[in-house]
Amino acid sequence: MNILALLADGFEETEFVVPFDLWQRGGCEVVTASIKGSTDVTGAHGLPVQANTTLGQINLADFDGIFLPGGGPGVKNLAASPAVEKALCAMNDADKWIFAICAAPLVLSKAGLLVDRRCTCFPGREEDLVCKEFTEDRVVVDGNIITSRGAGTAEEFALATLASMTDAETSGKIRKQIVAR
């Protein structure tokens, strides 16, 4: 499985690093792409990251899924990008995996991808969602779209997405390796 992780300045570090790490451990290849012209991206708490590439340089057909980490400023930057919305819609049209955590489901909502879906998001941001059903579940799987609540759910989110992309055995193996609950 090849996952495209979209990074915008202000992304929440935990929500990016935990899934990235667990997906890699589970045998997935994760490619990071900055949504701006430069590959230099800075997290919400100052973590500098050198993305592998930029969104403008990738071919979506090379990926099985796309991932949006949350973080207030990062989500604002993701939502402001027409290229991000176009990529999300293309991935959805191809029935590929779409993962969003924290406030990032708002970007999916803006793109119209949650109208017929159950989803979750960061507490207090649900009034900004346009979806079929909001739930306070920590991780929500609805078809090819998986959403989660925040940094405290990053591990559960990563393991649930890994189980969906690969299988329960792979996710269970990683769960055991990291001594997850």
Image (spheres, rainbow, N blue to C red):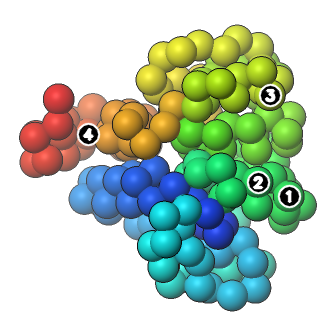
The one nearer the camera, 145 or 11, is 11
In 3D space, how far apart are the residues under numbered discs 1 and 3 (Cα atoms)? 15 Å
In 3D space, how far apart are the residues under numbered discs 2 and 4 (Cα atoms)? 31 Å
Amino acid type indicated by mark 3: Asp
The one nearer the camera, 166 or 49, is 49
The one nearer the camera, 81 or 67, is 81
Mark 3 or mark 4, earlier in chain: 3
Mark 2 or mark 4, earlier in chain: 2
Amino acid type indicated by mark 2: Lys
In 3D space, how far apart are the residues under numbered discs 3 and 2 (Cα atoms)? 13 Å
Residue carrying label 2: 76
Residue 52, above or below 172: below
Q: Residue at x 59, y 13 (%)?
A: 135
Residue carrying label 3: 128
Amino acid type indicated by mark 4: Ser
Mark 1 or mark 4, earlier in chain: 1
Residue 67 appears in the rendering: no
Marker disc for residue 171: 4
Q: Residue at x 76, y 61 (%)?
A: 77
